[in-house]
Image (spheres, coloured by chain):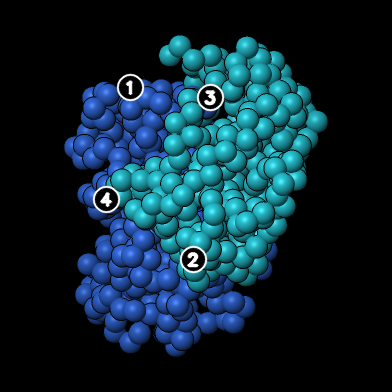
Chain colours: A blue, B cyan
Amino acid sequence: MSAPEHLLLVEHDVEGHATGWVDADPQSSQLRVTDVAATRGDGVFETISIGSGHPQALDAHLERFARSARMLDLPEPDPSLWADAVRALAELLADHEEAWVKTVLTRGVEGQSMPTGWAYGTVSGDFRRERTEGIDVVLLDRGLRSDAAATSPWLLAGAKSLSYAVNRAAVREAARRGADDALFVSSDGLLLEGPTSTLVLRRGAELLTPPTDLGILPGTTQVDLFAAAPDWGLQGRVATLRPADLEEADAAWLVSSVRHAAPVRSVDGAERSIDSELSAAMNGFLRRRLR
Amino acid sequence: MSAPEHLLLVEHDVEGHATGWVDADPQSSQLRVTDVAATRGDGVFETISIGSGHPQALDAHLERFARSARMLDLPEPDPSLWADAVRALAELLADHEEAWVKTVLTRGVEGQSMPTGWAYGTVSGDFRRERTEGIDVVLLDRGLRSDAAATSPWLLAGAKSLSYAVNRAAVREAARRGADDALFVSSDGLLLEGPTSTLVLRRGAELLTPPTDLGILPGTTQVDLFAAAPDWGLQGRVATLRPADLEEADAAWLVSSVRHAAPVRSVDGAERSIDSELSAAMNGFLRRRLR
């Protein structure tokens, strides 16, 4: 356990307001077994990349953290307090080119009405291979129709909740099929997102990504890439996408906060071309963001 | 915090085998924030009712615990060790007519390959009102087709995983609609199960419940009721059921380990008849089971 780890416990009052944080030892036990984080996956989280001490896309992450909390009827997380906590951890990790901080807000210990919160930071793994050589992806049915978020909000489609067992099972299923990652498809055949990533395609001079009203997460990394796209002579656009669009695209990526832009080099075993130059530009940009 | 609580931590070796358990204080922190129970809902559980010190349907619960573990690619829980742990907690709760024990097995702390396990026991709430007056239920789309378990095992339909945020959101949605509980329906219109219960209908001299191959949990309470049904002049049968079957049934219940048999007195605001006599017989039987 040589990787540096840091933990802040974000304390709350009975009204659900965060009151501050305290340092804690990440190697020690900090949660009760009756916290619904552990018994019900009943909470929300964000994972924020830290580049040489700079939290990246922090505002977008904290907006999404608040959005997920609303979808789960949790108290609104105080953006400035959480931002300060993330920055405090980022400073502790400033010696590392790539690190990440996870923020978690849970409904708390069963029977009490006080949320549990924490922010945990550590250094990132080495994703150079994925970023340059690419990843093998399989398409997996997510089972839900593309209108599930609108018709059935209790399914929490598009909330970044702690109930990620299905996302983890999807990655294991991908591994079982000899692949690195999965890309979810709606039951009515629309491309959605990866278990922990957003889909981005290049078609000519356009970057394309699926709309969030399909019950997927608003991608914080994707938004930054679309903002930078003009520097690469490209234009970002939201578009309804099907497997044929992926097949015909000039290039495809699964983008996320820690792995950044992983070019897709095969889909369901069928090889596809990757855009090495643009992948390098994207990852260089993502790694060096100062905010 | 007057309710008695007891906790045993079930320890594992790096091969995933349980090696024994130790007493622990349920009021103290026992889990690390990097346990995937807390960050990914990545584990399985069971809730076993304890009637005056007797674990009820223990074998069925531990079989289902093992089945859920297999569905999540977790190590097989050792049935005799877990049974002993449940019995040890049951003895501590023997002064109470109704109590329950929760068993939990998680994939453990991120980056280590050692499961985390615990068994937690406490006394039950008072469900007399629900058992006699009945509950108001709303039908909620679960979003998945009835064949999801067969076609898409990575969706974990029918696994009792810790990723229960959707089940909790469904109960909040029910409350928002003025009801007590939800009953899930598949996207192709078949009745499934409640967020924490099994559906049982009475039609004439038959008790009916939906088939588990619809991606629902095998109901431990339902199995015991079906075994006892001949004592009440009834015969249990598994049947594909639709909302019209619920409407036309002579009586309906959501049955579960702790609340036992809760008669359904309304569905989506439409009142329906309850069978008070049979409800009382069922609950008397369920509460007094010695195993």
Label 3 amino acid? Ser
Gap between marks 1 and 4 measured at Cα: 25 Å
Gap between marks 1 and 3 measured at Cα: 35 Å
Marks 3 and 2 belong to one chain:
yes
Q: Circle 3 — which element? A: loop
Chain where mark 4 sits? A
| Callout 3–callout 2 Cβ contact below 8 Å | no
Gap between marks 2 and 1 measured at Cα: 55 Å
Label 4 amino acid? Arg
Image quarter where the N terminus of chain A lies is top right
Q: Which residue is mark 2?
A: B244
* Marks 3 and 2, the one that precedes in the sequence: 3
Q: Is residue A191 above or below residue A93?
A: below
Q: Residue at x 30, y 78 (%)?
A: A239
Circle 1 residues within 10 Å: few <14, some 14–19, many ≥20: few
Gap between marks 3 and 2 measured at Cα: 34 Å
Q: Nearer the viewer, residue A230 or B134?
A: B134
Gap between marks 4 and 2 measured at Cα: 37 Å
Q: Nearer the viewer, residue A168 or A180?
A: A168
Q: Is residue A180 above or below residue A15?
A: below
Residue A67: which disc? 4
